[in-house]
Image: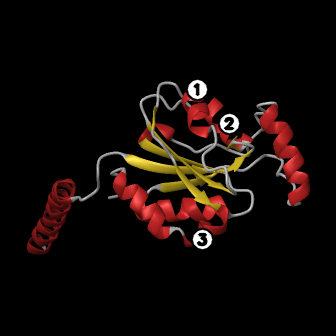
Amino acid sequence: MRTKLLCLLLSVIGLCGCNSTNAQKQPKTSNVKSGKSLVVFFSWGGNTRAVAEKIGQLTGADEFELQLAVPYTTDRDEIEEVAKREVRDKHIPKLASLPPNMEQYDVIYIGSPCWFNTFAPPVRTFLSTVDLSGKKVVPFMTHGGSRMGQSVQEIRNLAPKADVTEGLAIRESNATNAEKEISAWLKKNNLTK
């Protein structure tokens, strides 16, 4: 009986030792780059989502899609009128939720369709609500011809203590086939793993 207890005790001690040894080795062998990244985006028609997902895949970043508490219409003609009015008025619509634990991220990719020469109002809400001080902010947009518009300057105005980089503009008709363009842009800006 005593021998069985001694063997059991040694087994337990041995297992505990293995676990602590593995835990100590894990950080030394980790290949993860310092800091975490998050792709935050609003997508009305799916084009910006396609680009955001590709950025997430290529960088290993977490992804968060901004959604409105009351969704926009799905009618293209109606959304154009709503977008024009909201952009002009610098409207800040209510979001369904915000990304949790923002403090854990060092790099924030911010994506939007280009609406009337800037980002969509849900992105304005995000930028007006979340403190991005000290974070690297990397904008990207899908567009029908206006590229980034005035969005980079507006992001700098709304997040003055962030390091806002130049952005990536992807034509909406190419959004689902832009992997090479996105990959080249990420490499050029040292944003890949």
Circle 1 SS class: helix
SS under mark 2: helix
Of labels 3 and 2, the one closer to you: 3
- Residue at point 13% right, 65% down? 14
Q: What's the CA distance linking mark 3 and mark 2?
A: 25 Å
Question: What residue sits 29% from the left and 52% below the top?
Answer: 33
Q: Nearer the viewer, residue 8 or 24?
A: 24
Residue that label 1 marks: 157
Q: Camera-side residue: 46 or 32?
A: 46
Q: Is residue 44 left or right of residue 140?
A: right
In this orientation, which residue lies closer to the viewer: 140 or 18? Answer: 140
| Amino acid type at mark 2 | Arg
Q: CA distance from mark 1 to mark 3?
A: 30 Å
Q: Amino acid at mark 3?
A: Thr
Circles 1 and 3: CB distance less than 8 Å?
no
Mark nearer the viewer, 2 or 1 = 1
Structural crowding at the residue carrying mark 1, measured as other residues with C-alpha within 10 Å and reported as few (<14), some (14–19) or many (≥20) = few
Residue 76: percent from the left, percent from the top? 86, 59
Q: Which residue is mark 3?
A: 176
Q: Position of residue 176 (x, y in %)?
A: 60, 71
Whether residue 135 sits left or right of residue 15 in the image: it is right
Using the numbered discs, state the Cα–Cα distance from disc 2 to disc 1 in whole angstroms: 11 Å
Q: Earlier in the sequence, mark 1 or mark 3?
A: 1
Label whose residue precedes the other's in the sequence (2 or 1): 2
Q: Visible in this render: residue 60?
A: no
SS at circle 3:
helix
Q: Which residue is label 2 attached to?
A: 124
The crowd level at tag 2 (other Cα within 10 Å; few <14, some 14-19, many 20+) is some
Q: Are marks 3 and 2 in contact (CB under 8 Å)?
A: no
Give the amino acid type for the residue marked by disc 1 in the picture.
Asn
In the displayed image of the protein, which residue is found farthest to the front?
145
